[in-house]
Image (cartoon, rainbow, N blue to C red):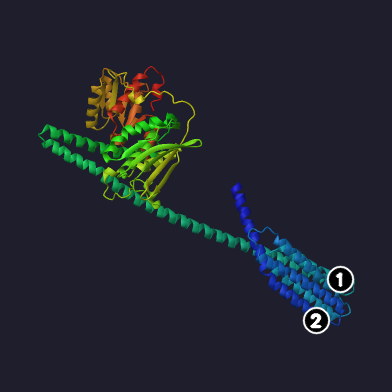
Amino acid sequence: MAVEASAEQAFQARIHDEQIELLFRHTPLAQATNLLVASVLVWFLWGVIPSGSLVAWWLAVVIIVLFRFGLTIGFRHRPAGSRVAWHMLMTVGAVLSGVIWGAAGVLFFVPDSAATLIFLTIILAGMSAGSIASHSSWPSAQYAYAVLTMTPIALRYLLEGGDLWVLGLMCLVYLVNVLAFARQLSRTLIESMRLRLEKQELVHQLREEMSAAEAARALAEEANLAKSKFLAAASHDLRQPLQAMNLFIEALRNEKDPLHAERVRVHLGASAQALEGLLNELLDISRLEAGLFNPQPRIISLQEVFDALKRELQPLAEEKGIELGFVATRLNIASDPNMLGRVLRNIVANAIRYTEQGAVLVGCRRKGSRVAIAVCDTGPGIEPEFHQAIFREFYQLGNPERDRRKGLGLGLAIVDGLCRILDHPLELKSRVGHGSTFLVHVPIAAGEVPHLEDMEAAVSAGLRGYAVLVVDDELAIRQAMAEVLGGWGCHVLAAENAQDALSRLATAAFSPDAIIADYRLREGRSGIEAIADIRRALGRPVPAAILTGDTSPARLREASASGFLLLHKPVQPARIRSVLASWRSELSAPAVHDAVN
């Protein structure tokens, strides 16, 4: 309501401005007419009225005309944002002009000269009627001028008496008609202004909507092009390790030499690892779009983060023949250790890939309540026009052949997304030929680093005798899960869907302690529905996890909203074992089944 009222006030202000603009637009011609008619009146009355009175009156007209001309010039040269009440000044001018002309009806009233009275009356009536055109945009000026011009001569006629009082009455009737006509004309004029401004506003809105539609169309085309490039790049990068794996499998099938076969298996494992890395990065991009990253900040030692990065990435730097250095620090920071680790790992790995000689140095510098973690390299540098583009998916500089050794083009896109979620401002400084520096600004934490147990390593409780129900519509997955879980000492029951699972449970010698279900099942069913059906039949909330290879943000959001633990394919067996071990270790906690995520 307040917004509508404000818009209406703004619209009225525009009409107000239009009225004033029109008032001053007609002023020059009206004042020229004033001066001409006054001069004709003085000429006609010369010899009838004392010349001194005529000259004084004419000079008064000239002064008023010059005053109103001056107002017009001042209005046209007004400074921007001027708050001078120009309409009030012009109304004052109209009042003064009306007083001067009204005075003529008294000063030059000659009862004995019919010609003088007729001419004077015609002049004053004409001036009153003529002011309608020049003052119609501002009714208060029009009314003041007409009333002050005609009323004095009308009263003079009435006071003279005799036959002249009829002329006085006629003057008053004439004045009423002039005022009525002026009022009607003013309303029509203001309404036409309103309609014209509304039309302009509609045209402006239409142009804005057309511009917005054009911008949306261009954005859609750009998004479609980006999607096509994304799919083309993803397809290429997925096919490369798959092609290598197929070739290595064929080579392994025909290889007789055990030593050479072992080398082939190593290459096969590397190709599988590369494929898994790409799938994980594609999944991270989808999780970012779906908003499934939920940071859990805590106090962490920045030096421990540096040490972990050095252990992981030192071999990559040694392979490239460059130096990887970390500047020691005692600072503690507040962040999500996994997400921050992913950010820094991607930046450092990217720096190593693009640095052919020299070094990559990682350090930090305190800035107020934050610390700037800097990753500096001696690589080729990045031109300013590419500083934004490198954070787009699958965008790479100097890699048209899609060499996987230079990365997949997703690392910095993931870095940018995670930094936004963590509220860790990301900064890039680079000079072509002098290397690049990426800075991540992280809050400094007060206090000591707490001792936290690593849930991924909580497998010491053992899984022997733990009963797991696997629901998956792929036979190969069911068989593989049964082999892996059985190897850990678990009791395993594998089913194709919820109905199959309930049939098998009816004759099974055990009841499941946990459920692992695939997200997509046959006949349009989902693992979420299967778990719900099984829980309902068992009458208890069995701990459950959803396995999914879906990268659609909408599907990921749906799966995450189920409240079950979400495991993304391909998931390492160690991750599954860690989850099962943590569930088993918490069996004594009554609320465990209600808080599986």
Left or right of 510 on screen, residue 152: right
Amino acid type of disc 1? Arg
Q: Is residue 572 above or below residue 103?
A: above
The residue tagged 1 is 156
Marks 1 and 2, the one that precedes in the sequence:
2
Nearest the eye: 230 or 467: 230
Using the image as rendered, state which of residue 240 and residue 561 is in the foreground: 240
Front disc: 1 or 2 = 2
Q: Is residue 8 above or below residue 378?
A: below
Q: Secondary structure at mark 1?
A: helix
Q: Is residue 520 visible?
A: no
- Which quadrant would residue 166 be assigned to in this image? bottom right
Residue nearest the viewer, comparing 299 with 306: 306
> Which image quarter: residue 582?
top left
Q: Which mark is residue 232?
A: none
**Picture coordinates of residue 25 (x, y %)?**
66, 68
Secondary structure at badge 2 equals helix
Q: Residue at x 69, y 67 (%)?
A: 72
Q: Quadrant of the C terminus?
A: top left
Residue identifier under label 2: 43
